Image: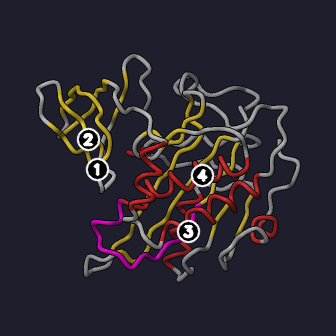
């Protein structure tokens, strides 16, 4: 595991932003606690960190496996002053931030699987979940950005349902500093956060993308379809040429590739 103990002070001293950092050995979910703190008035940039979760949350109501002595899980409170339709840009921008952080502190080359997963050596090592709470006027009161990173493989291995897809960022004998990984991710994110529509960020996402040129299965309006990935558009929507020749821009949904079933 990491050489340095994960701590609020250890993370905070590496941050380039002013932030309140809270670190826990175990939580039900960092997103749940962060939402509670945000509702009570927590400031933008406040961070909740946990070394394990009993009810880690993933996309589409899935759970996110978060065992002790395996990963690092953290949520950031955001109070964006942007149009509601642009809230969806936070997740892909966060994916770029995570990828850049990994590149900054290792010699590894992570890839982004649209829209919110980070892969290394064809295995998922990070998941991202953004949850927005909107006010009566339709604007976002706050957004919780949750990030879970698999640092090392659990000693008991991954559960049966994810063992073929889940991976870890580091080998058991590699040394690393999880404080630095969290801080670098946060620093990279806030460097990009000021302009979610930046062409530079879009290009950074594109160059790290998986799936381009791949034949995929995807779900649209509850119906499973097939097509070929052409890239992403300026809104980070997946551009797919369907088997019928139609060009589709997917805002969200389930995407699988061949028999690998990369969910």
Quadrant of the drawing holding the C terminus: top left
For marks 2 and 1, the one nearer the N-term is 1
Nearer to us in this view, 83 or 164: 83
The residue pinned by badge 4 equals 100
Task: Give the class, few, some or many, for how many residues have Cα within 10 Å of label 1's Cα (few <14, many ≥20).
Answer: few
Relative to 181, say whether 126 is above or below: above
Residue 58 at x, y percent in the picture: 47, 46
Residue 88 at x, y percent in the picture: 35, 59
- Residue range corresponding to the magenta coloring: 75-88
Task: Give the class, few, some or many, for how many residues have Cα within 10 Å of label 4's Cα (few <14, many ≥20).
Answer: many
The residue pinned by badge 3 equals 191
For marks 2 and 3, the one nearer the N-term is 3
SS category of the residue bearing label 1: loop
For marks 3 and 1, the one nearer the N-term is 3
* Mark 2 and mark 1: Cα distance apart in space: 7 Å
Residue 108 at x, y percent in the picture: 67, 38
* Mark 2 and mark 3: Cα distance apart in space: 27 Å
**Which image quadrant for residue 250?**
top left
Q: Is residue 148 left or right of residue 9?
A: left
Nearer to us in this view, 48 or 128: 128
Nearer to us in this view, 31 or 85: 85
Disc assigned to residue 233:
1
Disc assigned to residue 239:
2
Residue 191 among magenta residues: no
Look at 35% across and 75% down and name the residue there. 82
* Mark 2 and mark 4: Cα distance apart in space: 24 Å
For marks 3 and 4, the one nearer the N-term is 4
Q: Is residue 35 left or right of residue 125?
A: left
Look at 79% across and 71% down and name the residue there. 13
SS category of the residue bearing label 3: helix
Assess whether mark 1 and mark 2 are in contact (beta carbons under 8 angstroms).
Answer: yes
* Mark 3 and mark 4: Cα distance apart in space: 11 Å
């Amino acid at each position: 595991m990491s050489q340095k103990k994960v701590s609020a002070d250890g993370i905070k001293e590496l941050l380039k932003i002013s932030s309140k950092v809270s670190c826990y050995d175990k939580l039900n979910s960092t997103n749940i606690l962060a939402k509670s703190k945000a509702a009570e008035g927590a400031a933008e940039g406040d961070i909740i960190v946990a070394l394990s979760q009993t009810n880690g949350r993933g996309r589409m109501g899935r759970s996110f496996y978060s065992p002790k002595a395996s990963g690092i899980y953290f949520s950031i409170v955001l109070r964006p002053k942007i149009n509601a339709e642009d809230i969806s840009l936070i997740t892909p921008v966060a994916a770029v931030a995570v990828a850049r952080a990994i590149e900054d502190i290792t010699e590894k080359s992570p890839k982004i699987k649209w829209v919110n997963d980070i892969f290394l050596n064809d295995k998922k090592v990070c998941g991202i979940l953004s949850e927005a709470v909107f006010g009566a006027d339709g604007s976002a009161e706050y957004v919780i950005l949750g990030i879970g990173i698999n640092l090392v493989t659990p000693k008991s291995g991954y559960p049966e349902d994810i063992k073929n897809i889940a991976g870890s960022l580091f080998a058991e004998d590699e040394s690393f500093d999880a404080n630095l990984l969290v801080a670098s991710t946060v620093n990279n994110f806030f460097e990009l956060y000021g302009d979610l529509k930046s062409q530079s960020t879009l290009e950074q996402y594109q160059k790290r993308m998986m799936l381009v040129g791949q034949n995929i299965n995807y779900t649209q309006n509850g119906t499973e379809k097939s097509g070929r990935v052409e890239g992403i558009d300026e809104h980070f929507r997946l551009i797919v040429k369907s088997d019928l020749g139609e060009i589709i821009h997917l805002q969200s949904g389930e995407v699988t590739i061949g028999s690998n079933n990369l969910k």
